[in-house]
Amino acid sequence: MADEFDVIVIGAGPAGENVADRVVRGGLSAAVVEAELAGGECSYWACVPSKALLRPVELAAEARRAPGLTVGPVDTAAVLARRDEAVSRFDDGGQVRWIEGVPAEFVRGRGRLDGPGRVAVDLPGGGSRTLTARHAVVLATGSRAVVPPVPGLAEARPWGSREATAAKAVPARLAVLGGGVVACEMAQALHGLGARETTVLVRGDRLLGRMEPFASALVADSFAASGIGVRTGAEAVRVERPEPGGPVTVHLASGPPVEADELLVATGRRAATDGLGLETVGLPGDRPVEVDDSMRAVGADGGRLYAVGDVNGRALLTHMGKYQARVCGDVIAARAKGEPDDLPALRDAAGGYGAPQVVFTDPQVCSVGRTEARARAEGFPVRAVEYDLGAVTGAYLLGDGYRGRAKAVVDAERRVLLGVTFAGPGAAELLHAATIAVTAEVPLDRLWHAVPSFPTVSEVWLRLLEAYGL
Ligand SMILES: Cc1cc2nc3c(=O)[nH]c(=O)nc-3n(C[C@H](O)[C@H](O)[C@H](O)COP(=O)(O)OP(=O)(O)OC[C@H]3O[C@@H](n4cnc5c(N)ncnc54)[C@H](O)[C@@H]3O)c2cc1C
Ligand SMILES: NC(=O)c1ccc[n+]([C@@H]2O[C@H](COP(=O)([O-])OP(=O)(O)OC[C@H]3O[C@@H](n4cnc5c(N)ncnc54)[C@H](O)[C@@H]3O)[C@@H](O)[C@H]2O)c1
């Protein structure tokens, strides 16, 4: 088996797979090294299972808002079975075949850098193999959940996102540590699937602290209405679990402790750089791999190291990792062939605008670009307008008591959008129009002529522009 390739990719998550695809399209050969399952975190323990669990819960909430429909309880066993199908029962045969069809060589094993252009792979059955890259090594190793150093927490063996998304049964009493995206999505999914007492422990003063405050408030209202408890300013100081797998108690800096049957820790992620041999190319191993806009690692010996996806810390989102992968694969191919490597498509421009993101709670929270606070902090001449989504006819028709809100953050001098946030049931599909408007910097006076159809929720675009004064 040849051990020399044009490009070696470590990690076969969504980012790594797409790098291999692009470099091969560009005429190069590639090997992809994967320690666990081809498809990565996203396919088995993150995006795919979490959305499979959330969808019936969301749909039931939507159906309950539609007059004339009677909705029974969600069949948890059926939802868990569908989730198992969605993750291919942890069989990555389909993904491996996809990689081999690229065609790229799939190498099962744990890869680590062994100096510039060299990757040592520890093979599953023992032994190792050393691969060499003629043009580039790409790190696409993703991220790992962080467990904060709260006394007793690690010993209590709490759930992380992997255990929550792969749950075989739903705990009756669930405590969730963290108030970010994983905490909100999984609290709502597991509550909707049968956790009768769900408490989210938020260290800060609101859920989804990086989103516009009105979005946090709408999610908090929805949680309250469905019986999910939220405690803000909740700093965990000690965790006790006398019996493995038994009840767990979270003691807080103030207020009564919370007892639950399971504790989910969702307090963020860190780049998966452990044991990756970054020191062999002159880079620190204790932080995300810093890259330039062509995804090339800054300061790596030899200048042939790249990093895409969660491991570079730019945007911990599958679609952004895949975008970076397209940039990276194409730039590597261009450099290998001595072609111009500075064309617009060969740089990450999207990240600079502020990545689009959908939080799949009910209501969904969708944002792109900058929040008002961030735009002001960055010194833009900001004017922001908001509109009640529930007052749009298209939203009203979706069901009784539809609640939502939209906000546009405008650069008042250039009259272009700096950011847009929608919070409302079913708002996810509104986001791409906003992404186009923000990324293309469409002037408001031009947007005025993009007429939304009646009666769709998109009519909120017209209302936002009117609120701005058009
Ligand atoms: C619960 C949850 C839900 C999420 N939902 C969404 C969502 O709805 N939408 C969204 O956009 N994002 C979502 N995310 C984020 C998304 O999962 C990540 O941004 C995405 O998986 C990153 O892709 P990646 O390819 O960089 O890394 P990963 O998907 O983590 O893949 C990295 C791969 O590298 C392998 N690897 C690591 N080290 C080595 C090594 N030394 N040798 C060989 N292989 C190695 C790993 O086994 C893994 O297969 C979610 C995250 C979580 C935790
Ligand atoms: N739908 C989606 O797009 C989606 C879904 C899930 C995850 N993700 C991605 O995965 C990444 C990880 O998600 P996450 O929710 O784990 O991280 P996050 O950064 O979104 O949220 C972490 C939360 O934990 C809190 N926290 C941090 N340290 C703490 C501590 N010691 N004690 C108590 N609370 C603490 C933070 O204040 C924050 O509320 C995110 O960056 C997100 O982009 C995306």
Image: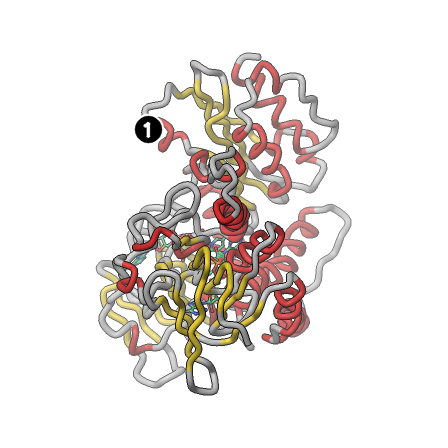
Q: Which residue is mark 1?
A: 378
In which quadrant will I find the C terminus? top right
Q: Position of residue 464 (x, y in %)?
A: 56, 23
Q: Residues within 10 Å of mark 1 (few under 14, many from 20)?
A: few
Compared to residue 18, the image places residue 157 above or below, namely below
In the rendered image, which quarter is residue 118 located in? bottom left
What residue lies at 53% left-to-right and 31% top-to-bottom?
Answer: 439
Q: Position of residue 360 (x, y in %)?
A: 55, 51
Report if residue 185 is visible in the image. yes
Closer to us: 390 or 274: 274
Q: Nearer the viewer, residue 431 or 462?
A: 431
Residue at 44% in and 52% down: 316
Quadrant of residue 211 in the image? top left
Image spot of residue 156 (x, y percent): 32, 77
Q: Is residue 142 above or below residue 159?
A: above
Q: How is the image coloured?
A: secondary structure
Whether residue 170 is visible, yes or no, is no
Vertical position of residue 420 compared to residue 365: above or below: above
Under mark 1, the amino acid is: Glu
